[in-house]
Amino acid sequence: MSDSIMYKHRPLGSARSIRIISLHGASTGELYLDLEESSLDSSPLYEALSYTWDGQTPDQPIKCGGKRLDITRNCMEALLRLRYPSQQRSLWIDSICIDQSGTEVSKEEKKQQIPLMGEIYGRCARVLIWLGQETEASTRSIRYLRDVSDHLQPFKSGSKHTPVHEIPLTDKERLWKRRADFQGQHYDLYFSRL
């Protein structure tokens, strides 16, 4: 794909416009997407992806509108995981939907788009959070969170939250033991109420 024509974002039509990704469905192969302009006022349906760039350079080529668009490896891995096998998926991802080219036009666009991000995330159908590829540490983290949730379930009394001090001592001890296991892995969990 290195000899492909590079994708260039078209300027947005209004200060309330955003771009929405239409991620083509496929079970394998290259990523294909299109960007479509939509007004936030028209209540478009989309999911917003939150992920970390991790200082990565956009060097992973995908097809956008039939042209090459370079994205970060982390973004590419998220898209590969999120795409449906046989239907399109509507997404908003800042690194793709906001022009990142560094031109004067893109700098002006960022000045308009960044203040809208709270509204963009607030109006989406749901927020998807990409933490990266599964690792041993992430598997332990998810297991730990499920453990905490399972132990708190019996203590819920119509409230969404159960103060930690209401957990019986034996369960507290088990939770703190699990927490100590994580500290050895450089994890610190902070909470006042669950």
Image: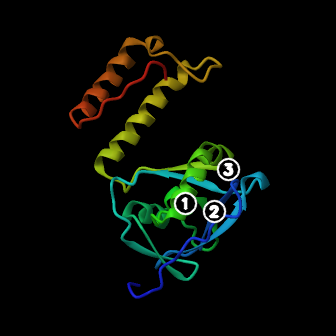
**Picture coordinates of residue 47, whole percent (x, y):** 62, 54
**Picture coordinates of residue 39, whole percent (x, y):** 73, 57
| Residue 99 visible from this viewpoint | no
The outermost residue toward the right is: 42
Image height of 71 relative to 61, above or below:
above
| Residue 105 visible from this viewpoint | yes
Q: Are marks 1 and 2 in contact (CB under 8 Å)?
A: yes
Helix or strand or loop: what does disc 1 sit on? loop
**Picture coordinates of residue 46, whole percent (x, y):** 66, 57
* Residue type indicated by callout 3: Ala
N-terminal-most mark, 2 or 3: 2
**Picture coordinates of residue 162, whole percent (x, y):** 53, 18
Helix or strand or loop: what does disc 2 sit on? strand
Image height of 103 relative to 31, above or below:
above
**Mark 1 or mark 3: which is in front?**
1
N-terminal-most mark, 1 or 3: 1
* Residue type indicated by callout 1: Ile
Give neighbour class at mark 3: few <14, some 14-19, many 20+ (Cα, 10 Å).
some
Q: In which quarter of the image is the N terminus?
A: bottom left
Q: Mark 3 points at which residue?
A: 125
Q: Mark 2 points at which residue?
A: 19
Q: Name the residue under label 1.
A: 98
